[in-house]
Image (cartoon, rainbow, N blue to C red):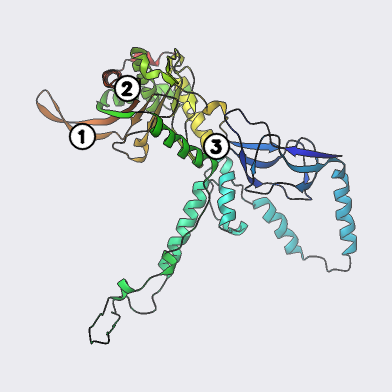
Amino acid sequence: MLIEIKVPVFSESITEGTLISWLKKTGESVERGENLVDIETDKVVLELPAPQAGVLTEIVKKDGAVVTSGEVIARINTAAKGDKKAAVSSDKSADTDKAPPQADQVQAQPSAAQTAPLLMPAAKKIAAENNLTTEKLATISGTGRDGRIAKQDILAYLKQTADSDAAGLQPDTPSDQPIRKIQPDGTDDTVPQTAARTDSATRQEKRVPMTRLRMRIAERLVESQSTAAILTTFNEVNMQAVLDLRARYRASFEKEHGIKLGFTSFFVKAAVAALKKYPIINASVDGNDIIYHEYFDIGIAVASPRGLVVPIIRDADQLSFAEIEYQIADLAKRAQDGKLTLEELTGGTFSITNGGVFGSMLSTPIINPPQSAILGVHATKPRPVVENGQIVIRPMNYLALSYDHRIIDGREAVLSLVAIKEALEYPVSPLFDD
């Protein structure tokens, strides 16, 4: 029986997707539930499992094709499952005159099949674009789930290879020898070899299409800046109290809850406290209406191999520190593995982005529409500050709150950021209670 493989029905916010890579070839047998192809949307990467076992007889849409909900992309012959082995057997019978493979060849083939590296979807695409063989991929250490090779692993390998190739290039003539150029009028236009010589290996270009997620990020950021009146207010916060609390509770917290006490949970708690004081910061614009959200769904910006994603911590005001840390760790891990669901990336009333993990000192974050504000957190560094007329060194963090001036006035924006500052500088231990 021939069955059609169709693109799953996308949610209302997604209109189309892109086939990243087929994991099966035409003529190969498939098992029920086995992933056939990865489909990238502007939010998540979906796996399309085989509905029944059989043989993949036709691939209608190739890698890179843009597809819509319900579109036929392949066909499986469920009746051909048992015929494939027979066909293989007959092929072997026809090849009886050929010399049998050597023992070392037979051993090498199963060995290669067993050690074939596993790649994340984005890594597969980059590996194919750069013609990386299985032997080359086998030399790359994967940092993804279960040792899978991720996008950043491929990029690091390509950079290392390029650097090695560049280091091995030898100039045809000593680089410090000048190139003499005498013009007809006798003018000496001698120039150094280093200035005159152009190394083509360092001036290569490669054009690659944007991923659907990157296109969506670009679209939303432009939309945010073109539709909202974005302003940013800044403040500094002394993180000494937070550092002291973490040092005091770190061991007992991890022993009791089985997870480390990070910094982000403090910022989530502080943000919720400020949003309760100033509800307009937690509101959004819908046409000529202002929607006040009486719940607190906090988006946490996460850098993933596919680009920036903002998974949501729902009802953050009702969660303990431990529950927030669990969710942050889980969302960050699945963001790296490309396993976030569409529901986990949808909604949110306020967002937090932490450029400090990359060393950022200050930034002006862009609002994630339809939200009306976003908190930018930066690197905590020891800095000289004045306390009681004395210059002292304190661990300082610069906070930035970008807000939509259409509905948020400067007063509320500044006061809400002060509230976040105060919640961080004067945290209390009962916050750790479940």
Marked residue nearer the N-terminal end (2 or 1): 2
- Residue at which label 3 appears: 42
Residue that mark 1 sits on: 383
Identify which amino acid the numbered label 3 is placed on: Asp
Q: Residues within 10 Å of mark 2 (few under 14, many from 20)?
A: some
The Cα atoms of the two marked residues, 3 and 2, are separated by 40 Å
Taking the spot 29% from the left edge, 33% from the top edge, the residue there is: 380
Q: Where residue 55 sits: x, y (%)? A: 81, 45
Nearest to the observer: residue 415 or residue 249: 415
Task: Give the mark nearest the N terminus, 3 or 2.
Answer: 3
- Quarter holding residue 376: top left
For the residues carrying marks 3 and 1, which lies nearer the camera in this image?
A: 3
Counting labels gives 3
Is residue 345 placed above or below 73 in the rendered structure? above
The x and y percentages for residue 186 are: 23, 87
Circles 3 and 2: CB atoms closer than 8 Å: no
Say which amino acid is labelled 2.
Leu
> Disc 2 and disc 1: Cα gap in Å?
20 Å
